[in-house]
Amino acid sequence: ALPSNGCQSPQGDLTPLLAPNPSPRPNPLSRVRSQAKFTFLIALLAALIVFVGLAMRCLPGRVASASRLSAASSRLTARIPSLRNFNQKIQTMGLTTTTRGGAVSRSTGHVGGTRSAAHRVFSTSAGEKEEVSERKLVPMDELVSLCKQRGFVFPSSDIYGGYSGFFDYGPLGAEMRRNIKDRWWQKFVTQRQDIVGLDTSIIASPSIWKASGHVDGFSDPMVDCKESKLRYRADQLFYARVETTEGTEVGYVSVLESGTMQGEAEKAAKKLLKAWTKEQSLDKRPEINPIELKPLDEAEPEIISLVPSPATGKPGDLTPPRDFNLMFSTQVGALADESASAYLRPETAQGIFVNFPTVQRAARMKVPFGIAQVGKAFRNEITPRNFVFRSREFEQMEIEYFIPNDDTWVEHHQKWLRDAWEWLVSIGLDEKLMSYDVHEGHKLAHYARACTDVAFRFPFGTQELLGVAARSDYDLRQHEAASGKSMEYRDDATKTKYVPHVIEPSIGVDRLMLALLVSAYDQDEVGGEKRTVLRFHPSIAPIKAAVFPLVKNKPELLEKARAVYNRLNRRYNIEWDQAGAIGRRYRRMDEAGTPFCITVDFESLEDDTVTVRERDSTEQIRMPIKDVYRYLENKIEGFEDEA
């Protein structure tokens, strides 16, 4: 069964770690602390040895092997029983010793985020409760700035002041979007025998959009501010009645939909109450009832005249809601009359539906089977906002999965929900920020049997990320009636004909990219220096690895490093960087989300080995050059997980 509305996916059972001890006993930490003073000095000595070794690595001609340093550290720990026992006791109590570079993230199943977000502390004494600090999300202004600075996303037409609702994707953004689409296509098309691909035209016959209902019904409720001339979507403009606990009306407040709108409304209500108290000449400010926000499109006409405009703060400035069609219209051909009118597609699904019988026969598919498509769609949004989350030009990844017209739709619907959730997690989405949202009542489309969204907690609030809808046979029957062409499928096994029902998993590339950026964004410290890092899954990272020659004034080093670069670049997007100190180069790659950095040094000239540095843990390992390609392949493609 599906989780309830808004419920997060089940996590591991923490009960054994949180249960009180059956009988009073001394806190195990007190016994450990007695050894801490002695082991601190030993640990400091071990850290000094590692520090000196790393310092030597940066000096040409005196590069120490990371494997030898690791072995020396292990031998030192093995000779000090107190230090080894200390670590064992810590692990026994359910705590983990981690490094600043990302081990905390892996130990909690977390991909990115601030360091305090994933860390958990479990009490060892009876009666104490678990302390879990909520993950702090990156502020949107910081994320937008990073995307522009590093070349992920730019405002469209930026030199002309931008163009609202449109964005351009820079070098890293273009690579990341391609990776997202490739992984989706590989998972749901290439690796499945029951799904085939399709690529339909952006402009098609207007009859398609008339039959599907888009011409008459694809609209959003819109209101205007008479004074400021600004426009708002009525279902994204919220209002609340402010009244005293005795039922006396104070007035109304309005806020735009956001993750902080409840707090904004309460602040506005207090300001309104203060002015009203002064106007009424009251000695004491009365208490008010809790603020309950409702979307403006559900308000009665007489209420709308009392709701203040967000732009002016004055009641009566908002017009009544009216429908606004979201389709972009255009002209096809030399004539500019009614017969030449056409539309940019607002979704990719209808191109799949009208091609259903042709694809089924050409690919010799049997129900159940699916048709997948990745492509651009266009919607003339009233108020595009929240960066690339809601824009006027976007890209969709959709599947129309055709199933028998019986009760098996429930099983198919739930299976697609599970498959979609697991895929999102597998490419690096933070599962702690994901939840299910079941559409019920007026939220459910009239033709749908069911619809459940996978929602994601963005910095601006929890919003739909992916939807899985059971669309019945509505679309196929609409096109059958309008075109006069049969959409029936003949089942050879049962010798029957029927119009299949449809399960539709759909997700936007732009929204998914934004969710991955939010999941991956992190800040920590490495060597006492603050760093910004994007902890992308290797398969999604725009740059898979970077190759560094240790210095740029040694031709033999450059030649060796270039050979490594050329070998890897045949398959993956590899960065070449020879400018600046190694540490600075690491930081540049961390900020771009590059999972691996490969350094070619003077030792490479002697034994054909290189240093591979892992982004999250900052750990460095030494390996032969001939093994680097297979190492990256395993990490990026996930072959190690399948072994």
Image (cartoon, rainbow, N blue to C red):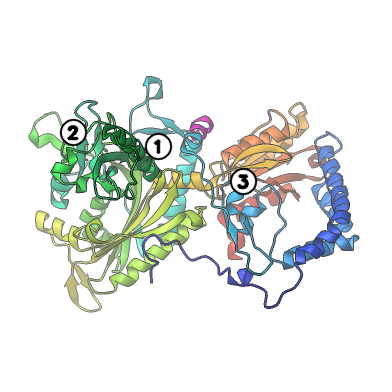
Image height of 634 relative to 240, above or below:
below
Which residue does the numbered mark 1 point to in the structure image?
387
Q: Residue furthest front?
A: 283
| Quadrant of the frame with the C terminus | bottom right
Please report the residue visible at 70 percent of the width from the left and 41 percent of the height from the top.
526
- Kind of residue indicated by mark 2: Gly
Quarter location, residue 372: bottom left
Query: Comparing marks 3 and 2, which lies closer to the viewer?
Result: 2
The answer to whether the residue labelled 3 contacts the one labelled 1, judged by CB atoms less than 8 Å apart, is no
- The answer to whether residue 344 is left or right of residue 584 is left
Which region of the structure is painted magenta?
A: 145-152
Quarter location, residue 606: top right
Rounded to the nearest angstrom, the CA distance separating label 1 from label 2 is 30 Å
Question: Would you say residue 147 sits in the magenta stretch?
Answer: yes
**SS type, badge 1:** loop
Query: Comparing marks 1 and 2, which lies closer to the viewer?
Result: 2
Q: Position of residue 607 (x, y in %)?
A: 82, 45
Can residue 181 be seen here? no
Decide which of tag 1 and tag 2 comes sooner along the chain.
2
Rounded to the nearest angstrom, the CA distance separating label 3 from label 2 is 55 Å
Decide which of tag 3 and tag 1 comes sooner along the chain.
1
Please report the residue visible at 72 percent of the width from the left and 48 percent of the height from the top.
619
Rounded to the nearest angstrom, the CA distance separating label 3 from label 1 is 26 Å
- The answer to whether residue 547 is left or right of residue 517 is right
Q: Position of residue 250 (x, y in %)?
A: 26, 41
Q: Could you tell me how many numbered marks the image carries?
A: 3
The label on residue 316 is 2
User: How many residues crowd mark 2 within 10 Å: few (<14), some (14–19), many (20+)?
Assistant: some
Can residue 446 be seen here? yes
Which residue does the numbered mark 3 point to in the structure image?
595
